[in-house]
Amino acid sequence: MKVSAEILNLVPYKPGKPIGETQREYGLTEVHKLASNENPLGPSPKVIEALLAALKQQNLYPDPSCYDLVKKISEKWNVPTSQVAIGNGSNEIIDLLIRIFCEPNDAILTSQAAFVAYQVCAQAARVKVRTVPLRSDLTIDLKGLADHFFRNPTANIRIIFIPNPNNPTGTSVGGEELDEFLVRLGNRDDVLLVFDEAYTEYVRSPKFKAASQFYQNYSNVIVLKTFSKVYGMAGLRLGVILAPEYVLEFYNRVRNPFNVNDLAQVAATAVLDDETYIQQSQKLTWEGLDYFYKELTRLQLPFVRSDANFVLFDTQRNANICFENLLKKGIILRPVGNYGFPTHLRMTVGKAPENKKAIEAIEKMLTEVPKIS
């Protein structure tokens, strides 16, 4: 069977290395994974209680409308139920938006070093990917995105993806630059502005403004949220789209029936009531980031201050060699050469003992891997 060039040339998304695989490969009994931006607290106690209660009904199909969860999100986030829909992780939502609003040879626009899923989903749909470089401080260049859109009217750019904060840099955008971006591109009928807000609960930047607070003022602004990070439900795969009704009408036509399983719906409904857990997740992350900043400064390793739950730092060495060196020490970090950072690693905040062991391993690695001159 013939396969299209886009599929033949598609580089699949590569997740963080699993703990079990690392244990088997290196004969280790203790491994700490700080690679995939997961919540180290484990699930909320309310989630575990809700899941146990729901197990007895797993012979039944899940609610295809996610009624209870949509209602809870509406109440907690102060958004109309008619503007909320659920996906099997935000990745499914990204994929469906591209399939719905782009035709082959149309284009999406995003930043260089933005979440790789945008490119994977677009290429799989025969849609072109256009990018704008990051600024020198590794923030997304909103003005550059708008300029690129207007300078390329024949490129058929249908969606602009703005991950805010961005993965893997941890940087966020806001302030006057965001306002100007919305003035230039908001309320257009030829392009959608998709703000991917997986990490907003961790933001400490005073200029940040969540798109979930202003999307209702624009006919073409969409917000993506996830339950994988601060809500500690990465394994259950659940994402949320906040969007105008006309967008969700098409989204609900295209998504598969029963795309979100019953346990994910039950768990998400429960965790939204656990404010204590959410606050604990934030506190642990902010304390961990501050610890990393202090230790990376001591080790004289440049890093990027983060509005997410991870830190990007420069090893000043071949990052793949550093990655392998740390694996042998039982520490899994994330090399990000595929994002254009060949000497950088991304390190997720873990529990305090894990963070300490990671720093100890990095300090030892610095004496074992030669610095690039």
Image (tube, grey):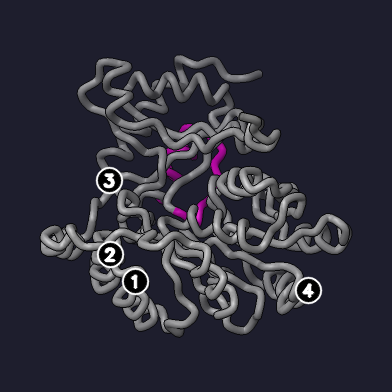
Is residue 99 found inside the magenta-colored segment of the image? no
Quadrant holding the N terminus: top right
Rendering quarter of residue 67 = bottom left
- The part of the chain drawn in magenta is 290-308
How far apart are the two marked residues, 3 and 1, measured between alpha carbons?
A: 33 Å
Closer to us: 18 or 204: 18
Residue pictured at 32% horizontal, 44% vertical? 350
Badge 2: few (under 14), some or many (20 or more) residues near its Cα, within 10 Å?
some
**Residue 184: assigned label:** 4
Alpha-carbon distance for marks 4 and 2?
Answer: 42 Å
Q: Earlier in the sequence, mark 2 or mark 3?
A: 2
Q: CA distance from mark 1 to mark 2?
A: 8 Å
Residue type at numbered disc 4: Arg
Q: Amino acid at mark 1?
A: Cys
Helix or strand or loop: what does disc 4 sit on?
helix
Looking at the picture, how far across and down is residue 78, in whole percent?
42, 83
Q: Circles 1 and 2: CB distance less than 8 Å? A: yes
How far separated are the C-alphas under marks 2 and 3?
A: 34 Å
Q: From the image, tell me which residue sits under label 1.
A: 66
Q: Which amino acid is tagged 2?
A: Pro
Chain-order first, disc 4 or disc 2: 2
Rate crowding at label 3 as few (under 14), some (14 to 19) or many (20 or more) other CA atoms within 10 Å.
Answer: some
Left or right: 328 with respect to 186?
left
Position of residue 15 in the picture relative to residue 243 (left or right)? left
Q: Amino acid at mark 3?
A: Lys
Reading the image, the residue beneath label 2 is 62
Which residue is under mark 3? 351
**What element does badge 3 sit on?**
loop
Q: Of the residues tagged 4 and 3, which is closer to the observer?
A: 4
Q: Characterize the local packing of mark 1: few (<14), some (14-19) or many (20 or more) Cα atoms within 10 angstroms.
A: many
**Residue 59 higher or lower than 346, as above or below:** below
